[in-house]
Amino acid sequence: MRVEILGQERRRRWCDEQKLEIIMSVGIGGATVTEVAQRHDVTRQQIYTWRSELKKKGLLSPSANAVFVPVEMNGTQTERRGDQQDPSGMIELRLACGRSLCFDSGVDAATLTRLIRAVESA
């Protein structure tokens, strides 16, 4: 019996750094697991498998799979100090690791996501 393989080989090798970069891109700019998987031509299940594998190796913090939900604020409270107002708009976020993160309300979601992941993994 003779077997002939036609077409390009689909098996690819991904180093841990590439896997980590792909996994960490989920949530950036609202990207879903499905969108990231399609962008990198892998399956959704592959991303979940990599996430589990990297956690076991200690390369990905257990809190990295936290889901961030957009928050909409209808108004900003200001404190009156005499005739001056203090429109600081600072927000304090308490993280699962026991740390607090203070940031300006004008920070964009992608930057905030990267910042939270950096603090959580430290």
Image: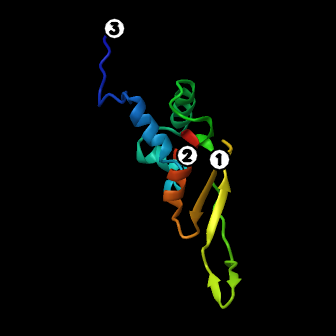
State the CA–CA distance, disc 1 to disc 2.
8 Å
Badge 1: residue crowd in 10 Å (few <14, some 14–19, many ≥20): few
In this rendering, the answer to whether 3 lies above or below 51 is above
Q: Nearer the viewer, residue 121 or 11?
A: 121
In this rendering, the answer to whether 95 lies above or below 20 is below
Q: Amino acid at mark 3?
A: Met
Q: Amino acid at mark 2?
A: Val
- Point 62% across, 35% down: residue: 62
- Point 61% across, 68% down: residue: 90
Work out which quarter of the rendered image holds the C terminus and state it.
top right
Residue at the far front: name it.
82
State the CA–CA distance, disc 2 to disc 3.
58 Å
Badge 2: residue crowd in 10 Å (few <14, some 14–19, many ≥20): few
Marks 3 and 1: in contact by CB < 8 Å?
no
Q: Which mark is residue 99?
A: 1
- Point 44% across, 35% down: residue: 19
> Residue 83: where, in percent of width, then height?
66, 91
Q: Mark 1 or mark 2: which comes first in sequence?
A: 1
Secondary element under disc 1, as helix, strand or loop, is: loop
Secondary element under disc 2, as helix, strand or loop, is: helix
> Residue 54: where, in percent of width, then height?
52, 29
> Residue 36: where, in percent of width, then height?
47, 47
Which residue, given by chain and number where applicable, does mark 3 sit on?
A: 1
State the CA–CA distance, disc 1 to disc 3.
64 Å
Q: Nearer the viewer, residue 51 or 97?
A: 97
Which residue, given by chain and number where applicable, does mark 2 sit on?
A: 119
Q: Is residue 48 left or right of residue 78?
A: left
